Amino acid sequence: MVVACGGKNESPAPSTSTSAAATGGDLAAAAQDAYTYAYPLVTMEYTRRVLTNTVEPQGTAAPMGQFVRMREYPNAQFRAVTAPNADTLYTQAWFDVAKEPWIVSVPDMGDRYFLLPMLDGWTEVFASPGKRTTGGKAQTFAITGPGWSGTLPPGVTEYKSATAMVWLLGRIFCTGTPEDYAAVHALQDQITAVPLSAYGKPYTAAPGVVDPAVDTKIAVREQVNALSGADYFRTFADLLKTNPPTAADAPTVQTLAKLGIVPGQAFDATKLDPGVASAIADAPKAAQGKIMAWAKDGIAAGDNTFQNGWLFTTKTGTYGTNYLQRAYITAIGLGANLPQDAVYPTSEGPSQQVKYNGANKYVMHFDKGQLPPVKGFWSLTMYDADYFFVDNPLNRYTLSQRDNLTTNPDGSVDLLIQADPPSDTANWLPAPKGDFVLMLRMYWPQETAPSIIDGTWKVPPVTQAP
């Protein structure tokens, strides 16, 4: 999926000055483009630091090479991560495959829906074993890094990462009942990882080392956005040593060289021409604005879709040279799946000018046979204006196909979205009194008509009830 470019010495030498043809505007644009290009890699590194800064697995963190196994869904008091889900339990781990591969063993998952997507440092999903792609039988696979060549044990499938940094962000479907929690916990405990050198031998993971300099309180995006241009690109240059650009990135590598950034070499802002240094210093604010503006600009470009009040994209997980789309998804949905695995339409209101509010009652109507077409499952999640679950007497945060929904006489289905309980609560998604947000999760969406991927199925609007 992603092919690493050639050796580290193939890039031009760093430039400490620019040609007479390079204007301040040229340099500013180059620095902003470079910032956008680097944004996923820098964000992944800061995320890795936060999620591995622990002695042993606990909460959402685990040392490198060890699994976080989330045991239950969050409730309305949970505030650690925005837009939590109550459909799948996360089983995730970070790996450094620079020196040797890691071997991951997965038990027989039966008919249960699961997926184990792996992201490289650029947020490209280079493999996604799971029910959709590999089935539910027990499997063992190796994650290998750039430049690795060797022999793997018999029966081990190789998934090759273009970078040393790898994030396995697994999800396992769970109904949330005590019985199903126990069943999923048993499966989670059987998903294991060891370095290739320890495969088939007794192995005990070493305790992690806590770095007190790592900030685990402030959100990663805020930390990254607060970096000065010089610090940002210094971090980026260090990461390039083991997370190289792809062959398709060659034009951008030339742009980076004009700014003194060369893969495999340290970045020293003190040696830059004043014009370059100024452009780098100004890049963060301007580039961040462009990245976040892509929510709307990407609609005009065809990368994002706004339809019936719902904003979504089917361009996630693989980006090629679409660096703005990649940076935007990093900013608002780091860890996004391939569209074949999941699509996440989100709606803050019936239009871009009007928000949903619990003072009103709403209906999401599905004609007969027109519920979200998926091979995995779908769910509609309620969030408050800050993208957290909404406290309610039923402790219900989603409606999905696993609920016993009431059907209308004509076979259609109405989901009732309101603050106060209706007389029949089977189809009720409790809303807060104030503004709220809806997210429709579609796991393993159908790829042939009707399909959200090719546009032959559209998410119906949420309309205000009379």
Image (cartoon, rainbow, N blue to C red):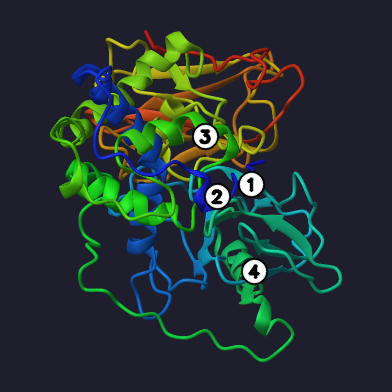
Side of 414 relative to 262 (left or right): right
Query: CA gap, disc 3 to disc 4?
Result: 25 Å
Q: In the displayed image of the protein, which residue is found farthest to the front?
A: 20
Is 182 on the left-hand or right-hand side of 392? right
Q: Residue at x 13, y 34 (%)?
A: 274
* Amino acid identity at mark 2: Leu
Q: Earlier in the sequence, mark 2 or mark 4?
A: 4
Q: Quadrant of residue 153?
A: bottom right
* Type of amino acid under label 1: Phe
Residue 126's tag is 1
Residues at marks 3 and 4 touching, judged by CB atoms closer than 8 Å: no
Query: In which quadrant of the rendered image does the N terminus lie?
Result: top right
Q: Which residue is located at x 26 percent, y 20 percent?
A: 22
Q: Which residue is disc 2 drawn over?
A: 119
The residue that label 4 is drawn on is 101
Whether the residues at callouts 1 and 2 have beta carbons within 8 Å, the answer is yes
